[in-house]
Image (cartoon, rainbow, N blue to C red):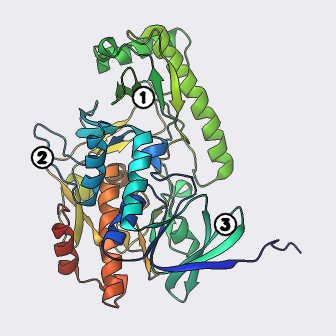
Amino acid sequence: MDTFSKPIRDLWHSDILVIGSGSAGATAAITAAREGASVTLVERYGFMGGISTQVLDTFYGFYTPGQEAKKVVGGVPDLIVEALMARGMALLRPNTYGAGQGITYDPETLKIVWEMLAREAGVRILYHTFVVDALRAGDHVHGVIAVGKSGFIRLTAEAIIDASGDADVAAAAGVAFEGAQDGPVQSLTTTFRLLNVDVERARAVGKSQLHALMGEALDKGYHLPRKEGSVHITPLAGVMATNMTRVGNIDATDPEQLTRAEIEGRAQALEYARFLIDMVPGYERAAIANLSTQIGVRESRRIFGEYRLTKADVLAARKFDDAIARCGAPIEDHHAGSDTHWQYLPEGETYDIPYRCLLPRVVEGLLVVGRCLSADHEAHASVRSMGQCMAMGQAAAVAAVQAACHKRTLHEIDMPVLQDRLRQIGAIL
């Protein structure tokens, strides 16, 4: 019989344990620590940020699309943006497809900003650590088993926030979820940045012209699975960033499939870069500056929570009594085909994200934030924007701290008290 070569050792207990330091988890950890809790943040990479520093360079969801950009995310997320702006490493930029004004930043600077704010708040960070199981007694999740180079460790807490992106803790704890085995999930994308670009000439190439050139490239034999996509300015001189590649029909929780996607995504990135350099004005002297650290996963597991956000909720701009955040982002479905399906809210409207979407059914002691919240496939394609992930993380942190302070379960949160505190720290409800 196989045995573990190393025992599981107890590491430490915290008020709040956050798994994953993407935009949701990083914001959750910083917020909880600023609220006075002891916080441990577990991250499998050697830096914070998740998709925000591994793959993308733009926060969407802070503003509504349409003729007037209304700000709908605030509080601790503003601190991140302010720190980037203070360093001259962020700028406001409209989305190519009308998804609203984005905040484009330098991902390398953001790594430092996330870490600086977390350390200043007193977050205990544990890098290079991968969560492999959940600890559950009855219906209560009270910790996780994680692994690093030194072996297996046990971490426990009064409340756990699953910000893994793939609902890893929730799935391990037995929470029901939907994933690739239940229907379509969005495609994956390897992003890349190009240096030595003549930015002025490159910016003069509009979306229609770029897509027409892609059509010509396809006729010439270039392999471009996505016949659209975007390339945009960055805070760095001579550097443009892309969102072009598409790898479809992948279950991102299956390591074999994810490996194939990583390889395919990088191969596509080289081909799209070749197309830009060969055929698009301004890119003649360009070269790839970097590829995304990993392929960008838009959708994997989505839990079943106490409420499930739906496409109808999104398009009707529905409001909820237990609102903890707002969103005006359109449904942006990167299906496996060559284009992207867009569905927009009414002009200037937003819908609410209910607290119940963060509360898994069956278990206690656990909140799920970020792109693995409780939502159907279409609603998820709107609410997964990084601005909303940050707002979810902020709300979950305040709820977890209030539950610990008042000796209540996460299902017994006093909603008006939670909402009042969120407003006090700058959240927009």
Whether residue 56 appears in this view of the structure is no
List the residue tagged with mark 3: 147
Element under label 2?
A: loop
Question: Which residue is the extreme one toward the right?
Answer: 1
Q: Amino acid at mark 2?
A: Gly
Residue 345 shown left or right of residue 394 in the figure: left
Viewer-proximal residue, 107 or 87?
87
Question: Where does the C terminus fall, quadrant-wise?
Answer: bottom left
Location of residue 413 in the rendering, given as x and y in whole percent from the top left corner: 28, 83
The Cα–Cα distance between marks 1 and 3, rounded to whole angstroms, is 34 Å
List the residue tagged with mark 2: 348
Quadrant in the rendering for residue 229? top left
Location of residue 129 in the rendering, given as x and y in whole percent from the top left corner: 61, 62
List the residue tagged with mark 1: 242
Q: Amino acid at mark 1?
A: Thr
Name the N-terminal-most of marks 2 and 3.
3
Element under label 3?
A: strand
Task: Give the residue at x 30% y 89%.
Answer: 406
Element under label 1?
A: strand
Quadrant in the rendering for residue 28? bottom left
Q: Say which of marks 1 and 2 sits in front.
A: 1
